[in-house]
Image (spheres, rainbow, N blue to C red):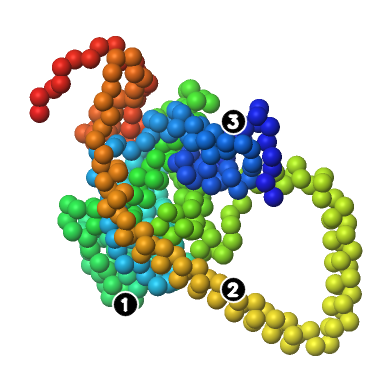
Amino acid sequence: MRQVLKVGEVEEAIAKVHHDICHLGQNQTQIAVVKRFYWKKIKEDVAHYVKTCHTCQLNQPFKDQPAVLRPVPPPRTAFAMWSMDLTTIKKTKEGFIHILVIVDYLTKWVEAFPLMCKEGKEVLKCYENNICYRFGFPKVLITDNGTEFCNKQLDKFCEDNHIAHRVTTPYHPQSNGLVEVTNKAVKQGLRKLKAIKKEINEKLKESENWTEDLGKVLFSLRTRKRKATKFSAFELVYGRNPRLAIDNELSKKTKGKNEENEEEGKENEQKEEKMEEEESENSDEEEEKESQIKMDEIKEKMKHLEKVARNNIKEEQKVQKKYFDIRHAPSAFFKVGDIVLVQNSRKRTRQGSGMEPNFTGPYKIKLKGKPVPK
């Protein structure tokens, strides 16, 4: 049930949802808002809010960055093929400086773990304990050719457990595009949460512990609807929609309206309990049969979701060139008086911290000079 909002309640509702999902883009915010609220011009209002969100503007990706998505045939089942990579970030007081990011190729389920070093044995220990012993041993593992992944320990582990270890082309991260895109999404989410904290507390130090926000960022990535699968990773794994913090707030508001229904529900529960007591003689066998039927239904549902997701991924891969062309459209031309953001040159030269925003500003153009010769 969606809640109808008045004009004065719109911006606050969008802001809460946008913050709950960790400042994801316009489409994801729109999906989350439309699920919970209704008012006229809802899509236009959400688009305007996200477009003018200062935190999102400062942390948007550089437009001329090469696209990193490349078609990889999706597996038939969940957790059969994982992609793994390491990304470096600002060092915390505890000494964490790396994030091990691991993504499932079918469901797009994301796992990320902070590491103090990137030695091969530490990476293998984290992968074995947090992936293999939680989700099962995969058939395929995709990594780059860094020494933290290409070493005797990991090679032996994969060989002993019959895991095909595929290595991407050197100096070509695009061939492991899924995890590269996820790396950027994780860092972008951490930067946005840090920016929000700074707005609240101006005395926040640069070495703020980003590990505290990692769980929230992962939740936002797992619950977002993916363009490739047409589902969220959460839904493909658990078979249901996730519950956000704002859903609890909405349920409290509607609780008073449903008190009468709750009383009727209690009466029905009591009747059901009496019927169960009367049929208790054969209850064990019947319960076992019913449980098996329900389990079979769940399995069929999950198989169907995986099949649909796989087909959706294939369809999405067919139009990758179209999205590539859109992302690499020529940059806009500016004129005097325009309000603009400026690219952070330190991020370009890799001198800045991974937690610095991609852009600074806003600034106003006062003078337009001659074009710089190439």
Say what amino acid the circle numbered 1 marks.
His
Horizontal side, residue 259 vs residue 4: left or right: right
Residue 68 rendering spot, x and y as whole percentages: 28, 50
Secondary element at image label 2: helix
Residue 307 rendering spot, x and y as whole percentages: 45, 71
Which dot marks residue 298?
2
Identified at 86% across, 72% down, the residue is 273
Secondary element at image label 1: loop
Instruction: Please state which of residues 288 and 254 is positioned toward the viewer in this rendering.
Output: 254
Quarter of image, res 228:
bottom left
Quarter of image, res 274:
bottom right
Instruction: Please state which of residues 184 and 99 is positioned toward the viewer in this rendering.
Output: 184
Residue 314 rendering spot, x and y as whole percentages: 36, 64
Alpha carbons under labels 2 and 1: distance apart: 29 Å
| Vertical position of residue 61 compared to residue 295: above or below | above
| Vertical position of residue 43 compared to residue 322: above or below | above
Residue 169 rendering spot, x and y as whole percentages: 18, 59
Q: Residues within 10 Å of mark 1 (few under 14, many from 20)?
A: few
Instruction: Please state which of residues 75 and 47 is positioned toward the viewer in this rendering.
Output: 47
Q: Residue furthest front?
A: 40
Location of mark 1 (residue)? 162
Identified at 56% across, 72% down, the residue is 301
Which dot marks residue 11?
3
Pointers 1 and 3 in contact (CB under 8 A)? no
Identified at 26% across, 46% down, the residue is 325
Say what amino acid the circle numbered 2 marks.
Ile
Q: Residues within 10 Å of mark 3 (few under 14, many from 20)?
A: few
Pointers 2 and 1 in contact (CB under 8 A)? no
Alpha carbons under labels 3 and 2: distance apart: 39 Å
Label 1 or label 3, whichever lies nearer to me, is 3
Say what amino acid the circle numbered 3 marks.
Glu
